[in-house]
Image: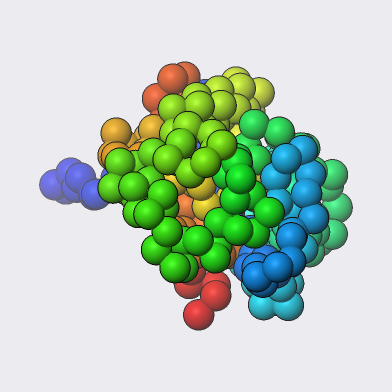
Amino acid sequence: MTREYRQPVYRPPTGAMDLLLIRHGESAPARPGERFPMKYGHGDPALHPNGEAQARVIAERLQNERLDAVYVTPLRRTHQTAAPLLQRLGITPIEEPDLREVHLGDWDDGEYRIRAANDDPAWLRALENHEWGEIPGAETTAALQARVGDALFRMAARHADQRVAAFVHGGVIGAALSLATGARPFAFLGAANGSISRLVIHGTTMSLRSYNDCAHLE
């Protein structure tokens, strides 16, 4: 019989962490003259009802996955998005402060959304230069990428040969995927609320396997 060589199926290398990066559900809207609640200097809005529905759909999508750990950030929109899945899995989340959203300085109380929607010059410079630091008082892109990278490599060291889910933020996903691919810092900015992206981290190497999977949301 002639030997057959079928196309291989991808498997993470031995010792790698298989990571699902899940953007939190849609959060409450910003309104002129109203400030978001603040936590550790960050805007901390709760989920919008749409975000609560997205959280339930994420739980349905992932309830049968083998997840060895689930991470959240200090901000409540990630806790609220993870809650339906955690209830189904019966596990306690791990909070990772360095995966919190980019610090937006003077705009972190909801002002960012209003300024960006109205093409504030500082926001347009940030987009052009791929630099969060163009926003008054904001964290720099380099600082964001450094802390996100450190957090991911620490997690990978703890979770060799495991699959992990992390409920995080759009800026964090953008930073992680830029680090993984070498793309410009804002290349992956704009992952959809409730979307799932996949990174495989092995030692100091990150490999992007999928981005902005929204099949469960459609």
Using the rendered view, name the quadrant where residue 24 is placed: bottom right
Q: Is residue 24 above or below residue 180?
A: below
Q: Position of residue 156 (x, y in %)?
A: 57, 26
- On screen, residue 155 versus residue 202, left or right, reads right
Q: Position of residue 108 (x, y in %)?
A: 64, 49
Q: Position of residue 65 (x, y in %)?
A: 64, 55
Camera-side residue of 171 and 54: 171
Q: Is residue 10 above or below residue 121?
A: above
Task: Identify the residue shown where x is 24% and y is 49%.
Answer: 7
Camera-side residue of 41 and 160: 41
Task: Identify the residue shown where x is 38% and y is 46%.
Answer: 126
Task: Identify the residue shown where x is 20% and y is 45%.
Answer: 5
Residue 40, visible in the rendered structure: yes
- On screen, residue 42 versus residue 19, left or right, reads right
Which coloring applies here?
rainbow
Residue 72, visible in the rendered structure: no
Q: Outermost residue, left direction?
A: 2
